[in-house]
Amino acid sequence: MKLPTQFFLYAALLFLAACSSDPNQEKLKYLASGDRYFQTGQYQEAVIQYRNALQIDPRLARAHYQLGRAYLSLNARDTAYRELAEAVKLQPNYPDAQLQLAALLNAGGRHKEARAVAEKVLAADPRSARAHRILGDQYVAARDIPHAIREFEKSMELDPALIETYADLGSLYVLTGKPAEAQSVFRKAV
């Protein structure tokens, strides 16, 4: 008995449909896997998983952001910058990506750009301790110590758990010859 050609065509289509998976589920699986690797310090593996997610959906801002963080952990700053910039381009109101990008800009000596990004975040969320800290770093670079102190204090007030701010402010007090203030800040940190 000879089967019609249509039968084989339908059978092949059903087989292909059963074998294929939902791309949205696949990209989320890769993203979750990347997050697990990232959390355990396996940054190279995380990079692979985030890149897999981006092969499925190159416009996935969160994958670009996480990939940027993984590259930062691998000390690949230029690549991290590109990924963070892409995350911000794809999702302009992504404060975590914006702040990470601003910190990189500050570290790279691009203080005006860092300040613009931090101010944009503060315009949307004036209570962003991390944005105030980045502004403080920018003021330190500009040697505007009074403004730097004010921004670090504001950051500490908004998020007392952001320990890096205590170190920044305490160090600033040491550098400006104010050991009593530095000691007070370091005690608060402890």
Image (cartoon, rainbow, N blue to C red):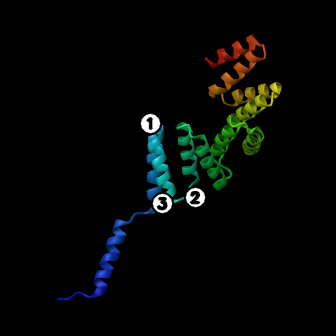
- Which residue is painted at 64% across and 55% down in the image? 90
Within 10 angstroms of label 3, few (less than 14), some, or many (20 or more) residues?
few
- Residue placed under numbered mark 2 in the picture: 59
Residue at 73% over, 31% down: 137
Residue sitting at 73 percent across and 15 percent down? 174
| Position of 58 relative to 157 (above/below) | below
Is tag 3's residue or tag 2's residue first in the polypeptide sequence? 3
Real-space Cα separation, disc 3 to disc 1, in angstroms: 25 Å
Which residue is at the front of the view, 61 or 114? 114
Which residue matches tag 1? Answer: 40
Using the rendered view, name the quadrant where residue 153 is placed: top right
Near mark 1 (Cα within 10 A), the count class, few <14, some 14-19 or many ≥20, is: few
What amino acid is found at the position of numbered circle 2 in the picture? Arg
Question: Which kind of residue does numbered mark 3 sit on?
Answer: Asn
Quadrant location of the N terminus in the rendered image: bottom left
Residue 44 percent coordinates (x, y): 46, 42
Q: Quadrant of residue 169?
A: top right
- Helix, strand or loop status at disc 1: loop
Confirm or deny contact between disc 3 and disc 2 (CB under 8 A): no
Instruction: Determine whether label 3 and label 1 are within 8 Å by CB.
Output: no
Which secondary structure lies at badge 3? helix
Provide residue 14's location: percent of width, then percent of height.
33, 74
**To which quarter of the image does residue 80 belong?**
top right
Q: Amino acid at mark 1?
A: Thr
Answer left or right for 152 relative to 23: right
Mark 3 highlights which residue? 24
